[in-house]
Image (tube, rainbow, N blue to C red):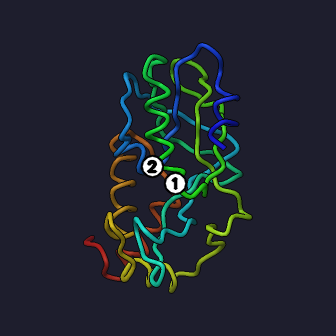
Amino acid sequence: MLEQTLAQWPPGGDLWVFGYASLIWNPEIEHDQRHPARVHGYHRRLSMWSRINRGTPLEPGLVFALMPGGACQGMVFRVPRAIARRELDKLWQREMPTGVYDPRWLPCRTALGTVRALAFTLSRNSPNHTGALDEARLLHIFRHARGRYGTTLDYVVRTEACLREHGIRDRALSQLLGLARRNGLLGP
C-alpha cells in the first residue's frame, strides 16, 4: 500500500499531510508549515475501534476516522521534499501498522490555495468501522475504555480543544462532549 501511495505522490513536490484529529495536536513529523484546511467529500467521525491506543481487545475504545461524505476542517502540514520520504516512513509506521486506513491524496483548500495532501480515510466496509453507536454504548466506552495513550474521552476532549484553538468548530464533536457533560463525565 505504501508503494501505491508513493506512486500517486505528485512528482517533484513537497509532502502535504492532512490532519483531522491527533495529527493536529501531535503530528510527530517534521514540517515547516501548517495551515487550516478544508476537505470536501469526507467528514470527521468518532467511528473507528481502537484496541491499543485508546482501548484494549476486551474493552475497545474509539478514535476519529475520516469518513466518506460531507466536509472536514483540519490542518495541512508541509514536509519539505528533502526530508519527505523519511517523515512519510515515520507517519506510515504511526498510522498504518495494521493497514487499517485507506490512504488517499485529497485536494485540501487553504488560504494559500488548494494543495494535494495525503489523508488517512476509513471505509464504511472496514472491520474497524463501528457503524452507528447509541448513547449508552458511547457512555460505556467513555467510562471504561483505556489504552496505552489514555481514554477515548481524553482523546475527544483534546481534539476538540485543539480544533477550537484553531477556530474550527465541529458540531458532532460538540454533541459528543455535551453527552459526556450531561452524564457527569466532564465539568460544565
Q: Which residue is tagged 2? A: 94
Neighbour tally class for label 1: few under 14, some 14-19, many 20 plus, Cα within 10 Å = few
Give the tally of numbered discs.
Answer: 2
Q: Residue furthest left?
A: 187
Return the x and y of residue 83 as percentages of the image width and height: 43, 22
Horizontal side of 118 relative to 23 (left or right) equals right
Three-letter amino acid code of the residue under disc 2: Arg
Instruction: Name which residue type carries label 1.
Output: Pro
Q: Is residue 142 left or right of residue 67?
A: left
Q: CA distance from mark 1 to mark 2?
A: 6 Å
Callouts 1 and 2 close, C-beta under 8 Å: yes
Q: Nearer the viewer, residue 140 or 16?
A: 16
Q: Secondary structure at mark 1?
A: loop
- Residue, x 56% and y 58% (percent of image)? 98
Q: Which quarter of the image is occupied by the C terminus? A: bottom left
Residue labelled with disc 1 = 97
The residue at the point 51 percent across, 34 percent down is: 17
